[in-house]
Image (cartoon, helix red, strand yellow):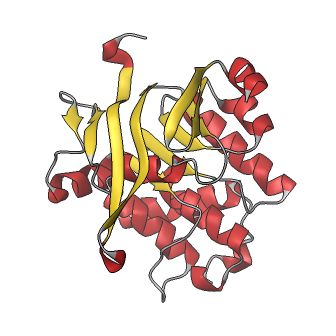
Amino acid sequence: MSGTDRVLDVRGLAKSFVLHGIGGRVVRAFSDVDLAVVAGELVALAGRSGAGKSSVIKTVYRTYRPTAGSVAFTPAAGAPVDLAALPDTEVADLREREIGYVSQFLRAEPRRGALDVVARAGVRRGMDAGQAREAAADVLAALRLDQELWQTYPTLLSGGEQQRVNLASALLAPPRLLLLDEPVSALDPANREAVLGMVERLVAAGTAVLSILHDHDAIRRLATRVVLMADGRVVDSGDPSTVLAAA
């Protein structure tokens, strides 16, 4: 893997939380995490619940500021930047244009229908309103969200439906880097297949993906490499068949 291929290069990343309500106790979420993702590959974060995987994703996205380490992101144009050190305004700009994030939970404006929520994500990435609305309809259909639900407020949808709206918003204009936190956890088999197929096509088109996946079948299907975590540390990394066999 050459340095010029890397979209994401994480080195020595660590995050601890200070619990001020109980005497300033320090809790370590994870430490000494190294990983890299190149264009056109999916790297899967695996491990048991509580291993620190979601905290790593949130720190890469800069929801959390790291305690230590660097998060080098290479934009489509320009030199790598350290997301850990950038001002909030510059991080927000990169999120709008080049970094997508799909969590297990949807945070949407309460009085906008699902189609509007997705279309607005496209507008933020440079589409005109009409183009964004057409693209939003296409991606919602591809993700098998019933058309009769497109005008429904996302807060009234089921967990699996919300998850697909969240994913549609991230995939509307494919980002350079996509962060996924359990993208198929709440989906039935048919909708799971639709989502996995869309992610597969996105990777084939050149997006770099860092995803938390518990489903070993999905990891074997999609992942180029697996980073296995336990107790807040990376304990193994490599080919999915080898790492999963030893897990």
Pick whichever, 26 or 96, lies toward us.
Answer: 26
Using residue 110 as the reference point, say whether residue 191 is left or right of it. Answer: right
Q: Is residue 128 left or right of residue 164?
A: left
Residue in the image at 72% along x and 77% along y = 158
Hey, which residue is sitting farthest bottom in the picture?
Answer: 111
- Which corner quadrant of the image does residue 138 belong to? bottom right
Hey, which residue is sitting farthest right in the picture?
189
Q: Position of residue 68 (x, y in %)?
A: 26, 42
Figure label count: 0
The quarter of the rendered structure image containing the C terminus is top right
Q: Looking at the image, can residue 183 be seen?
A: yes
Quadrant of the snapshot with the N terminus: top left
| Residue 224 image-quadrant placement | top right
Q: Residue furthest top?
A: 2
- Compared to 213, does 163 lie above or below? below
Q: Residue at x 54, y 26 (%)?
A: 41
Q: Tell me where residue 131 appears, x and y as whole percent.
A: 44, 59
Residue occupying image coordinates x 64% and y 41%: 47
Q: Residue at x 59, y 54 (%)?
A: 50
x then y, percent, for residue 142: 69, 54
Residue 172 seen anywhere in this rendered image of the structure: no
Is 17 left or right of 194, judged from the image as shown?
left
* Residue 62 rendering spot, x and y as whole percentages: 31, 53
